[in-house]
Amino acid sequence: MQRTGPDPNAEARRHGTSPAPVDPAIEALVKDIIGKVADKWTMLVLEALQENGTLRFTQLGKAVAGISQKMLTQTVRKMEEDGLIKRTVHPVVPPHVDYALTPLGDGLSQAFCGVWIWAEKHYEEIQRARQNFASTQGQARGS
């Protein structure tokens, strides 16, 4: 595994200094956000809104292939609660509801864009590692 540089925490321990204390409130927030956005539906809704801008509920459902109406409803409510998307209800008959990323949601979408870039860059390496692992597991079972 190639490392891009020394791990600051490991270096701090090696030199006898400890890293700055982590604010427990920030740590809890990070764990909560990761838990909420790590599910595939939230990530796909973020991606759909990032790529398409404001979408109506049915358009959003089509953009996120495979999501049920119930799961889409739950996902957008959770995202709205966290301030990631804005839900706008237009007072017409039938009701017209739009969803768009907030600046907060846009920032999160940009942060996760790095994961896509990383995956694209390391795709072949990961595929080789998975193939090697599968072949060693097959050999170990065959012994």
Image (cartoon, rainbow, N blue to C red):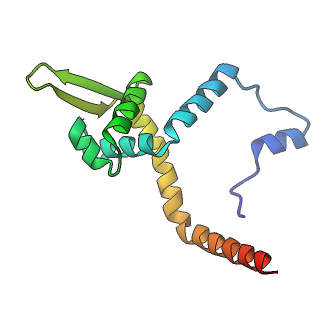
Q: Name the spot of residue 128 as percent of width and height, x first.
A: 62, 74
Q: Position of residue 56 (x, y in %)?
A: 21, 36
Question: Which quadrant of the view contains residue 18?
Answer: top right
Q: Give above or below for 2 relative to 131.
A: above
Q: Is residue 9 left or right of residue 79?
A: right
Quadrant housing the N terminus: bottom right
Residue 117 placed where, x, y %? Answer: 48, 57
| Above or below for 81 versus 125 | above
Whether residue 54 is visible, yes or no, is: no
The quarter of the picture where residue 99 lies is top left
- The residue that appears at 55% across and 72% down in the rendered structure is 124
The total of numbered circles placed on residues is 0
Q: Nearer the viewer, residue 68 or 122?
A: 68
Instruction: Identify the image quadrant of residue 49.
Output: top left
- Confirm whether residue 88 shows in the render: yes
Q: Quadrant of the C terminus?
A: bottom right
Q: Nearer the viewer, residue 36 or 70?
A: 70
Please report the residue visible at 10 percent of the width from the left and 26 percent of the height from the top.
94
Which residue appears at 71% of the width and 58% of the height? 3
Q: Is residue 51 left or right of residue 28?
A: left
Q: What residue do we see at 66% from left, 27% from top? A: 27
Q: Residue furthest left?
A: 93
Q: Is residue 43 above or below residue 104?
A: below
Q: Is residue 52 left or right of residue 27?
A: left
Looking at the picture, how far across and down is residue 13, in whole percent? Answer: 87, 39
